[in-house]
Amino acid sequence: MSGLSAMGATPRAVQGAPCWVSLMVRDLEAAQAFYGAVLGWEYEPGDQGRRGDSIALAQGLPVAGLRETAQQMGMPVSWTAYFKVDSADSVVERIRERGATVAVGPLAFSKGRVAWAADPAGAVFAIWEGDVANWQFTRSVGAPTRLELRTRDPFAMALFYGEVFEWDTDQGTHDIRYEHDQVILRIGGHSVAHYSGGAVESAPDPRVRPRWHIYFFVDDVDAAAQRATEAGGSVVAPPSNSPFGRVAGLRDPQGGLFDIASDV
């Protein structure tokens, strides 16, 4: 989660807005080399000054955190999306009340508090209480451009997250609509999260289990997919056109799944 406080302290982000993404890895140097080759990232030390932490920079701006803890904790290499909350304690209580799981926290971390959870369908996410930049998904090369939750029942999960983050009390800041066979959340006019169906918790393939997919913007999806294979990764969903641009699903050499997108 390194980088949340390094993004520039300002409390403008509204509750429930995506505010950060992080990757838990086994080998930090190898991960840096791979994502540098694919997404053009450069790096700086994490804000805690802890060995094994780094912040990924795209065009000089912080876009993601990398932490070398997966091997020590016996956890899979995976990407996690973080959502801004006003009170971690209150949100954790609402998560549990709605049949979901809080795995860790809330814990004090850096200049805020964090908790990791899984929604009722099993998709992992995290919450952050503390100052963050008004972090918007952009179509800037190397930066996250959107989140997509693939789950069994997108309407039920949109309701779950809406109740957990109390989107209906935000005086019109949040807008939820059904478009292109997906439930789409917009905050302040920006599309930030999509909910689509088809994933099931019992699926043996992690690509089709409920999870948050993080899309990073690239100039050319096909070229980026080729760079990924050349750098030791693999293509799990070949480049194709979608209503939201050209997209592809990739796996890094340590097993981390992520997605890329570009304009068609």
Image (cartoon, grey):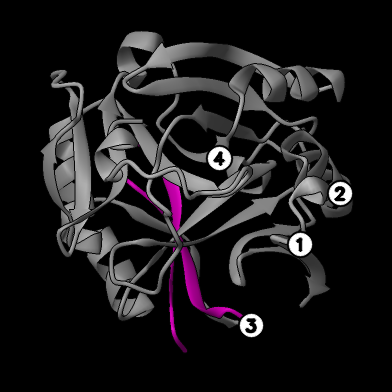
Q: Foreground residue, 41 or 92?
A: 92
Residue at image coords 37%, 48%: 133
Asked whether, in this view, residue 242 is left or right of residue 2, the answer is right
| Residue labelled with disc 3 | 243
Q: Earlier in the sequence, mark 1 or mark 4?
A: 4
Q: Amino acid at mark 2?
A: Asp
Q: Is residue 253 visible?
A: no
Residue at image coords 49%, 73%: 247
| Residue labelled with disc 1 | 172
| Residue labelled with disc 4 | 83
How far apart marks 1 and 4 lie (CA) works out to 18 Å
Q: Earlier in the sequence, mark 2 or mark 1?
A: 2
What range of the chain is rendered magenta?
243-264
Q: Earlier in the sequence, mark 3 or mark 1?
A: 1
Q: Residues within 10 Å of mark 4 (few under 14, many from 20)?
A: many
The quarter holding residue 71 reads: top left
Q: Residues within 10 Å of mark 1 (few under 14, many from 20)?
A: few
Q: Amino acid at mark 3?
A: Pro
Using the image, determine if residue 194 lies above or below residue 12: below
Q: Earlier in the sequence, mark 3 or mark 4?
A: 4
How far apart marks 3 and 2 lie (CA) works out to 20 Å
Under circle 1, the secondary element is loop
Q: Amino acid at mark 1?
A: Gly
Q: Foreground residue, 180 or 139?
A: 139
How far apart marks 3 and 4 lie (CA) works out to 25 Å
Under circle 4, the secondary element is strand
How far apart marks 2 and 1 lie (CA) works out to 25 Å
The quarter holding residue 143 reads: bottom left
Asked whether, in this view, residue 130 is left or right of residue 9, the answer is right
| Residue labelled with disc 2 | 153
Q: Is residue 102 visible?
A: yes
Q: Position of residue 47 (x, y in %)?
A: 20, 29
